[in-house]
Image (cartoon, grey):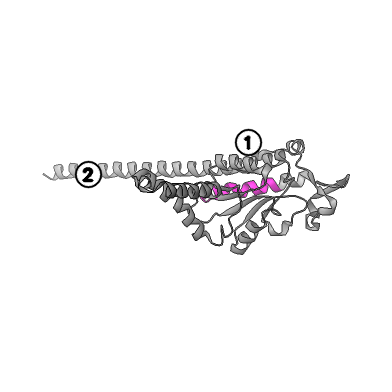
């Protein structure tokens, strides 16, 4: 499983390449191994330890049935995050972060409901009663909402956590999560401030190979958590069935015993 990502795999994916030394955030010092040709090199043993720690927590959240919202709007991360988050059945934002996504969640949900309303109108025939111009306006609105919010259509309540690629770029998402006390999991490059992050994964957040290996690992941990939940539910259902069968058998035995007793008394 990708959870057991080895240091060699991280090295091959270029996870260790940080930013230029002049762009660093001194708070990342504990995760930096050395400087090479004006670039900071990340300590991959620390990356692996932090990744394992983050994956364990992500697995628990998924097993509890709550959602983790993935956030990555930079070009080289968008498709990777959409694929892995989608595979793990988790919501994601890969277009512009909608201001108030968390702090004004009710308004965002209203926008998502607008999409559902258009879909219903198309099914029940109301859409056909609109003029050509109105239909064009409705379609444009639906397409815009789909682009920005389509991937969170099933997120009916606040996420339990955020997984962010590049906290410097996604600073608004970080700010909103901090304000609401929502835990942040993040790939943090050498220019990031790790103090804002609950689960720091020191890593190159610019190269697609590096993003892919880390996000895939997180998604696999989430899938394992969903499997844990499924197994637990199956076990509970089996235990319930067994209990009911036992109670039924006991009831039948009791009824039989009472019938025999009644016969004897006659």
Label drawn at residue 255: 2
Apparent side of residue 174 relative to residue 241 in the rendered image (left or right)? right
Residue 60's place in the image compared with 181, above or below, is above
Q: Secondary structure at mark 1?
A: loop
Label drawn at residue 104: none
Magenta-tinted stretch: 50-67
Which-is-in-front pick, marks 1 and 2? 1
Q: Quadrant of the N terminus?
A: top right
The image shows residue 186 at horizontal and vertical percentages of 67, 51
Q: Quadrant of residue 243?
A: top left
Does the magenta run of residues contain 88? no
Report how far apart the C-alphas of labels 1 and 2 lie in the structure: 53 Å
Q: Secondary structure at mark 2?
A: helix
The image shows residue 167 at horizontal and vertical percentages of 69, 53
Read off the residue under disc 1.
1
Is there any visible trace of residue 214 in the rendered image?
A: no
Is there any visible trace of residue 165 in the rendered image?
A: yes
| Closer to the camera in the image, 198 or 132 | 132
Q: Residue furthest bottom?
A: 179
Q: Quadrant of the C terminus?
A: top left
The image shows residue 193 at horizontal and vertical percentages of 74, 57
Q: Residue at x 55, y 49 (%)?
A: 148
The image shows residue 134 at horizontal and vertical percentages of 43, 50
Residue 119's place in the image compared with 1, above or below, is below
Q: Which mark sits nearer the N-terminus, 1 or 2?
A: 1
Near mark 1 (Cα within 10 A), the count class, few <14, some 14-19 or many ≥20, is few
Name the dominant secondary structure of the magenta segment: helix
| Closer to the camera in the image, 153 or 1 | 153
């Amino acid at each position: 499983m990708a959870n057991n990502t080895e240091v060699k795999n991280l090295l091959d994916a270029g996870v260790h390449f940080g930013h230029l030394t002049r762009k660093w955030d001194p708070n990342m010092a504990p995760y930096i191994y050395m400087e090479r040709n004006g670039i900071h090199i990340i300590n991959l043993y620390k990356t692996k330890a932090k990744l394992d720690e983050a994956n364990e927590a992500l697995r628990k959240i998924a097993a509890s049935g709550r959602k983790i919202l993935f956030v990555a709007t930079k070009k080289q991360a968008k498709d990777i995050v959409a694929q892995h988050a989608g595979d793990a059945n988790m919501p994601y934002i890969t277009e512009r972060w909608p201001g108030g996504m968390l702090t004004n969640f009710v308004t965002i949900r209203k926008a998502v409901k607008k999409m559902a309303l258009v879909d219903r109108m198309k099914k029940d025939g109301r859409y056909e009663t609109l003029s050509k111009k109105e239909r064009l306006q409705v379609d444009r609105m639906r397409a815009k909402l789909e682009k920005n919010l389509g991937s969170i259509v099933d997120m009916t309540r606040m996420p339990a956590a955020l997984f962010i690629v590049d906290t410097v770029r996604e600073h608004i998402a970080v700010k909103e999560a901090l304000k609401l006390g929502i835990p942040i999991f993040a790939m943090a490059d050498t220019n990031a401030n790790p103090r804002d992050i609950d689960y720091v994964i020191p890593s190159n957040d610019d190269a697609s190979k590096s993003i892919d290996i880390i996000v895939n690992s997180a998604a696999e941990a989430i899938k394992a958590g969903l499997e844990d939940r499924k197994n637990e539910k199956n076990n509970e259902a089996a235990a319930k069935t067994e209990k009911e069968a036992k109670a039924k058998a006991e009831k039948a035995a009791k009824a039989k015993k009472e019938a025999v007793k009644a016969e004897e008394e006659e």
